[in-house]
Image (cartoon, coloured by chain):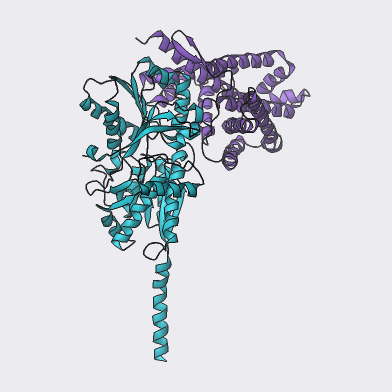
């Protein structure tokens, strides 16, 4: 009798442990899925989902499946915070991977800090996310940051035969930071450079005409822009109509990924071919590694698109780092995972990336190139396209 | 000292923005003047006009007249929707408190906004300029796109047509009378409820047309409804609630302030608009051409 009862008790005690092993690891992903930012946000979520599906097909991590809980942050800091809190408190997510804009990133970082949950940012670029006064043990970034992007652009523009440069950027953390880092660095590289004009439309602007006219009046020889996503589509349509690109002879670099296939595809013949742009990925990148070509084949199949998005890779890499850190920590506890992420190197489709301990920033470079019309594709591509290693720009 | 071609170019872009806003705000002003309701859903009709135009262009392809058919078709579709909304839903609220009418229009904003998302998704959409109006003319050293010119000419044309209809036609007289004293008008044997429906349909037509015509210049995106209703409201308030030419004047001023505001406040372009509204309300609370409300 006692024996039966003891065995029953033992069985009952092991039940919750067994249930614990089957419980999925939940990852919350607040990301914009509506409006102009969705052009970038929606594919990023699909990239994350593809990685999760691949891992789950191999049995998950630590014997547990991963469940990705995606929510629309509407590219608004308040909404992103609300959604992040809901994911933590109602959905009981173990980790957060997400946000897109540099307004959402720092806001959700605060929520992650309060709740001691690891937060990996795959897209927000503002330096403020990992600045010394904002850094905490639970925030990590696998995107480039504004210092890296601004300086990469400065290196490229310094080689152009121009001295009168103008900038146009959204008036928020990302636009301000990337413009400042560009201006500071190009003045170092080429002291003869003169910044003749700076325009600051508000984030979400739909009518750029006044800014375009004002900038053209100052007669710049080149422009550095960080207008991004669906907003770049609207901006360049209006700019082209006003003869803006002709006036600067297409000496224009569109930071904020104006060179991505999604942008050139969605604009078709309206795209201002001849400008420079950058992108996190390009399916047509010929000099890439076998790992990249293999990833491109998989994402193309997953998205059912022969010209797959360049944003999926950031969601993918974000999840890669999380899963590798869980494996290294042998635990899904945020404390242990946050320590495992420090100095972690992962073989991503764009090469080996490492999150450095100093500021939890990965050395994620981007592809830069001048856009051309190629007969092979129904939209413009960057050619030649070069991966700019940001390590020398990271101080 | 800014050079003249820049001032000219900037004022043209201000005029273009003004004429779009006038198209939309005139509908809002009309509904307020006659029905005495601030129709929040007017911005939604504008958005639905844009989406409908996009849809019709998708169906018709990019022929030489498909854009114009789409614009007219979209405006008519939105007018029809306005008529249905007014006749079957709004009319039941006329006897009730004005608060209910306001809440109803707000509910429409939410419901129709979601319907638009369900039908067309959340990604932004875009239409190219119609063939024939794709290039630009060079005047005084500035590049003026033909489409902008078209809008700048259309605005006053519609304003004049409107004004003529209001002043010279029988229906126009009834509309003006209804704005002043609806009970007496009803007592005189005029079918006031049909008049109301007609006004709502006309206003919705204008809102939908504004939305359709703006598509080659801006993105069609969720959220465009709430953004435009605030702008239209500012225009109507500056010009004077219920005053037709006030709306036209308000739109003109708004457009120029928007254009040149960035020269004085480069980092606060939206601030200049609200500063203007505050100034007008302090000096003349009933708007520039309005009359004090009873």
Q: Which quadrant of the structure image shows residue B131?
A: top right
Image-based side of A151 in relation to B210, left or right: left
Q: Is residue A135 left or right of residue B100?
A: left
Residue B70: image quadrant is top right
Asked whether A35 or B138 is in front, the reply is B138
Can residue A332 be seen at all in this image of the molecule? yes
Check the rendered structure and report the hue given to chain B. Answer: purple
| Image quadrant occupied by the N terminus of chain A | bottom left
Number of numbered callouts drawn: 0
* Residue found 39% across the figure and 77% down from its top: A13
Quadrant assignment for the C terminus of chain A:
top left
Determine if residue A172 is in view.
Answer: no
Percent x, y of residue A290: 37, 48
- Residue in front for this viewpoint, A253 or A337: A253
The residue at the point 56 percent across, 19 percent down is B247
Residue B83, percent across and down? 69, 32
Residue located farthest toward the bottom when viewing the structure as drawn: A1
Residue A148 lies in quadrant:
top left
Q: Residue furthest right?
A: B189
**Residue B81 location (% of width, % of height):** 67, 34
**The color chain A is rendered in:** cyan
Residue A64 placement (x, y as % from top left): 40, 64
In terms of depth relative to the viewer, which is nearer, A64 or A347?
Answer: A347
* Residue A389, placed above or below residue A324: above
**On screen, residue A321 above or below B175:** below
């Amino acid at each position: 009798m006692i024996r039966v009862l003891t065995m029953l008790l033992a069985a009952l005690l092991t039940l919750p442990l067994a249930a614990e092993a089957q419980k999925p690891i939940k990852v919350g992903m607040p990301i914009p899925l509506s409006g102009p930012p969705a052009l970038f946000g929606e594919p990023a979520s699909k990239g994350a989902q593809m990685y999760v599906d691949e891992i789950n097909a191999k049995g998950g991590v630590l014997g547990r499946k991963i469940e990705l809980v995606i929510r629309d942050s509407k590219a608004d800091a308040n909404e992103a915070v609300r959604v992040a809190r809901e994911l933590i408190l109602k959905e009981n997510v173990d980790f957060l991977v997400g946000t897109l804009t540099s307004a959402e990133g720092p806001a959700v970082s605060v929520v992650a800090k309060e709740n001691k949950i690891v937060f990996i940012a795959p897209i927000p670029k503002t330096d403020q996310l990992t600045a010394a006064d904002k850094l905490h043990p639970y925030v990590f970034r696998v995107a480039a940051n504004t210092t890296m992007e601004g300086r990469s652009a400065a290196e490229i523009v310094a080689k152009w035969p121009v001295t009168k440069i103008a900038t146009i950027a959204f008036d928020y953390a990302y636009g301000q930071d990337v413009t400042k880092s560009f201006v500071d660095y190009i003045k170092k590289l080429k002291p003869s450079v003169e910044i003749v004009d700076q325009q600051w439309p508000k984030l979400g602007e739909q009518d750029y005409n006044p800014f375009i006219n004002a900038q053209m009046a100052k007669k710049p020889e080149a422009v550095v822009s960080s207008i991004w996503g669906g907003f770049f589509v609207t901006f360049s349509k209006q700019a082209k109509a006003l003869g803006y690109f002709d006036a600067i002879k297409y000496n224009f670099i569109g930071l904020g990924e104006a060179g991505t296939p999604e942008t050139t595809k969605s604009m078709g013949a309206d795209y201002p071919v001849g400008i420079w742009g950058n992108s996190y990925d390009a399916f047509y990148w010929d000099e890439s590694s076998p790992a990249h070509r293999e990833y491109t084949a998989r994402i193309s199949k997953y998205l059912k698109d022969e010209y797959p998005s360049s944003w999926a890779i950031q969601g993918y890499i974000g999840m890669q780092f999380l899963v590798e850190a869980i494996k290294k920590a042998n635990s899904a506890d945020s404390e242990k995972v946050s320590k495992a992420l420090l100095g972690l190197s992962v073989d991503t489709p764009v090469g080996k990336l490492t999150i450095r301990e100093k500021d939890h920033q990965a050395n994620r470079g981007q592809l830069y190139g001048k856009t051309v019309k190629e007969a092979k594709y129904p939209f413009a591509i960057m050619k030649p396209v070069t991966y700019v290693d940001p390590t020398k720009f990271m101080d | 000292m800014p050079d003249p071609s820049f001032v000219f170019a900037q004022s043209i872009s201000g005029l273009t923005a003004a004429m779009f806003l006038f198209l939309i705000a005139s509908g809002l002003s009309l509904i307020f003047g006659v029905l005495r309701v601030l129709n929040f859903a007017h911005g939604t009709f504008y958005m639905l006009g844009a989406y409908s135009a996009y849809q019709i262009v998708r169906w018709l392809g990019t022929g030489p007249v498909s854009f114009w058919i789409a614009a007219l078709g979209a405006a008519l579709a939105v007018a029809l929707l306005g008529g249905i909304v007014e006749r079957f839903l709004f009319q039941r609220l006329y006897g009730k408190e004005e608060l209910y009418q306001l809440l109803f229009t707000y509910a429409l904003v939410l419901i129709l906004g979601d319907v638009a998302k369900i039908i067309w998704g959340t990604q932004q959409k875009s239409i190219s300029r119609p063939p024939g109006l794709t290039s630009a003319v060079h005047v005084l050293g500035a590049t003026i796109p033909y489409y902008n010119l078209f809008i700048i000419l259309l605005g006053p044309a519609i304003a004049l047509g409107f004004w003529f209809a209001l002043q010279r036609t029988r229906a126009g007289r009834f509309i003006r009378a209804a704005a002043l004293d609806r009970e007496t008008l009803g007592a005189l044997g005029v079918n006031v409820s049909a008049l109301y429906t007609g006004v709502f349909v006309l206003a919705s037509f204008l809102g939908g047309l504004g939305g359709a015509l703006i598509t080659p210049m801006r993105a069609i995106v969720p959220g465009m409804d709430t953004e435009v209703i605030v702008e239209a409201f500012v225009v109507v308030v500056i010009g004077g609630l219920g005053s037709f030419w006030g709306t036209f004047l308000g739109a003109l001023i708004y457009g120029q302030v928007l254009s040149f505001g960035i020269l004085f406040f480069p980092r606060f372009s939206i601030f200049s608009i609200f500063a203007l509204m505050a100034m007008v309300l302090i000096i003349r609370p009933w708007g520039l051409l309005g009359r004090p409300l009873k």
